[in-house]
Amino acid sequence: MDRTSGTTAGAAAGGEADPFTAGRVTAAVLIIGDEILSGRTRDTNLGDIAKYLGAHGVELAEARTVSDVQSEIIAALDALRTRYNYVITTGGIGPTHDDITADAVAAAFGVELYEHPDILAMMTARWGGEINAARRRMARVPVGGELVNNPVQGPPGFMIGNVFVLAGVPQIMRGMLQDVGPRLKGGAVVVSRTLRVEGSGEGAIAAPLEALAKAHPALSLGSYPFYGADGFGSNLVIRGRDPVEVEATLTELIAVLAEVGIKQVQVVETPA
């Protein structure tokens, strides 16, 4: 079976009933590692990736976390890479026996792994002498893969099809992202504005917010409540690809809230 079909199909199936379908470029993140699922390690990569992709006009549409089981990685990767324009994996490319991401990615694409000569040369320059078996594991790349530069330390990641395979260590992952950006073909950047409403619950906000959302189907409007020692309220977020419409809708939102007696509001973001 040829498992490479559909690797660049992108978001053809990923934009159904979505206000950002027009001009939408999407990505998914696949977080790999038992240590994440067990709670021993807290993932911080997802937020960094989302912000980075957004600045390049790519919307992070889904994230999954899977264990260090090859069949689970393959199943998740096959589902994501055919639905979204890009997939970024993090974790599982180190030197130990449970670092099996490269094996899973190669299997998903139906190709073999080989020891990349450039990586071997980097290792020799760094460590000298004989490279042990554990380190050689980090030199393995699927046939047809392209290297993703690692400016921090250790071997690079790689890209094959629409999949970028990056390290799980946050500092290294962020360094690798810098080589991902130039390879992305993004769409229009999504901009957002946030209106902080204090002293009013979502029950009072729901009706005017819903009416405004129906009047602006090209935008996404969301309510995110907060509670604390200083009070309660909601952050109302307007997102879209037309900054003029986003800004106009913000003004309209303030007005419709005032009409129902909600005036304790504050814009807490500047236009992106």
Image: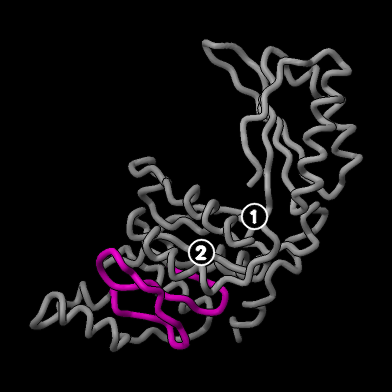
- Magenta stretch contains residue 238: no
Which residue in the structure is indicated by mark 1?
61
Say which residue appears at 80% left-offset and 33% top-offset. Answer: 251
- Magenta stretch contains residue 157: yes
Residue farthest along the left direction in this orientation = 129
Say which residue appears at 85% left-offset and 25% top-offset. Answer: 255
Crowdedness near tag 1: few (<14), some (14–19) or many (≥20) residues, C-alpha within 10 Å: some
Q: Which residues are magenta?
A: 138-165
Q: What amino acid type should be assigned to the residue bearing mark 2? A: Ile
Nearer to us in this view, 184 or 83? 184
Which residue in the structure is indicated by mark 2?
88
Q: Position of residue 85 (x, y in %)?
A: 64, 69
Indicate the colouring scheme. Answer: one colour
Crowdedness near tag 2: few (<14), some (14–19) or many (≥20) residues, C-alpha within 10 Å: many
Say which residue appears at 87% left-offset and 43% top-offset. Answer: 216
In contact (CB < 8 Å): disc 2 and disc 1: no
Res. 118 image quadrant:
bottom left
Examine the rendered structure and indicate whether residue 37 appears above or below residue 237.
Answer: below
Q: Position of residue 253 (x, y in %)?
A: 81, 30
As measured in the structure, the alpha-carbon distance from the residue carrying label 2 to the one carrying label 1 is 12 Å
Q: What amino acid type should be assigned to the residue bearing mark 1? A: Ala
Task: Please tell me the numbered disc located at residue 182.
Answer: none
Examine the rendered structure and indicate whether residue 199 appears above or below residue 272.
Answer: above
Res. 28 image quadrant:
bottom right
Label 1: which secondary element: strand
Side (left or right) of 111 relative to 81: left
Label 2: which secondary element: strand
Q: Say which label, 2 or 1, has the lower sequence index.
A: 1
Q: Position of residue 142 (x, y in %)?
A: 42, 82
Q: In which quadrant of the rendered image does the N terminus lie?
A: bottom right
Q: Position of residue 113 (x, y in %)?
A: 38, 84
